[in-house]
Amino acid sequence: MSKALDGLRILDFTHVQSGPTCTQLLAWMGADVIKVERPGVGDATRQQLMDVEAADSLYFTMLNHNKRSLTLNSKNETGKEVLERLIKKCDVLVENFAPGALDRMGFSWERIQELNPRMILASIKGFGPGPYEDCKVYENVAQCAGGSASTTGFRDGVPMVTGAQIGDSGTGLHLALGITTALLQREKTGRGQKVTASMQDAVLNLCRVKLRDQQRLDHGPLKEYSQFGEGVEFGEATPRAGNDSGGGQPGRILKCKGWETDPNAYTYFITQAAVWKNICDVIGKPEWKEHPDYATPALRLSQLNGIFDEIESWTMTKTKYEVMDICNPLNIPVGPILSMKEISEEPSLRDTGTIVDVEHPERGNYLTVGCPIKLSDTDVEVTRSPLLGEHTDEILAEVLDYNADEIATIKESGAV
Ligand code: CAO
């Protein structure tokens, strides 16, 4: 089967998490991704959070599948010549260096366009133009600066970061969309263009419902937030809302059978208005269906705590899976809180290729998350991440057409 991005060649100058997420997705869609790494050093994550001695870390392997690795010192004169040749042969250059690093290497956008006017230069930076544009940024900094931390956690607690890597992987996803749309536009114009995604922007984009709430505050309290029912006044900014649903259908995380010993024996429970009557029947409160205090969504908003306490006294008599089994046929939206252990053992996720077993020469077998986007005409086969410089000779010869003598000279110069 052919793949969506067959024939596309990506010069992958990314490192750590944000950029590699993007290029891994493009590799899964069929692009030939050439990961450029510093000779002898490589992507710093190869040696971060190591769990198996002398083996690339899971941090690295899980972000760099289906790529080829070329070592290249882009600050060495011969290395620069090799890089120029690569730019001419590739469709997209993706990078997430600290601000200005590519320019300092001598590869400004202007220079790249001179070398290859069809080249798409795709960059991730922490911030867009403005007071913080020169700052280095990691995941949690982006979560904080993008509005996520101030709106995550409980009202009486400190701001919280979330385990979902919305700053890194979230920005990588945004960039991948930017690249594919720029490629489509190139079909019409024949020109490349510059694509940038800032981590602050990406996090804010993912937090847009909280900016929605910021403006709603000007017109009164946020009635679906628990604090409304608790009679706690709203301040000037969108508050932290604990596990309240971010939408118009109130929801909470509730205890299930076994919660005393199992930290994940919980369910998310949504009191969707359309199925209120079913909820009343399930929890043994049929009188609430037409009750003057509970019959409509508006009436219920001021008493969500009491309603969820009652629902919880029912969910506590069931496992999180039993809650799912009982509520789903009644169209009541619920979701078990699944641990990473449960997810890694879930057969249906293996069947869809969302969780994949990969064999690695240094570390043996490990689990990874496969491609989360399924295309009916692109079958994704997850292959292991490359060892440092594993494909250097192959790329110099096959992609850049250097002969054996030239390759020997390049090696002597210390460029690869
Ligand atoms: N050959 C020669 N030099 C190379 C090279 C290569 N193949 N690859 C990288 N380098 C050089 C860079 O040119 C840079 O040199 P200068 O400082 O002299 O310009 C140097 O290595 C360090 O690169 P860096 O500044 O990008 O890396 P860092 O470890 O200092 O910072 C990070 C890391 C992530 C904070 C920074 O890259 C950044 O802010 N990136 C943008 C935002 C981002 O993606 N953050 C998410 C990271 S995942 O949490």
Image: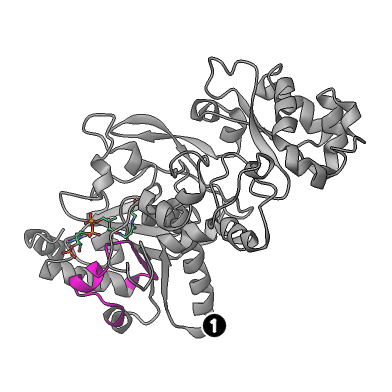
Image location (x, y in percent) of residue 216: 65, 61
Name the one closer to the observer, 134 or 73. Answer: 134
Q: Where is residue 107 in the image (x, y as percent from the top left)?
A: 24, 74
Question: In the picture, residue 51 is in which quadrant?
Answer: top left
Q: Where is residue 340 in the image (x, y as percent from the top left)?
A: 49, 30
Vertical placement of residue 144 versus 325, above or below: below
Residue identifier under label 1:
188
Q: Magenta segment: does it hold 46?
A: no
Residue at (68%, 39%) from the top-left corner?
A: 251
Q: Report the side of 129 relative to 388 (left or right).
A: right
Q: What stretch is highlighted in magenta?
A: 89-110
The front one of 182 and 313 is: 313
Q: Where is residue 125 in the image (x, y as percent from the top left)?
A: 35, 64
**Quick one: label 1, few (<14), some, or many (20+) residues within 10 Å?**
few
* Residue 99 highlighted magenta (yes or no): yes
At horizontal 74% and vertical 21% (from top left) the residue drawn is 314
Secondary structure state at the residue bearing disc 1? helix
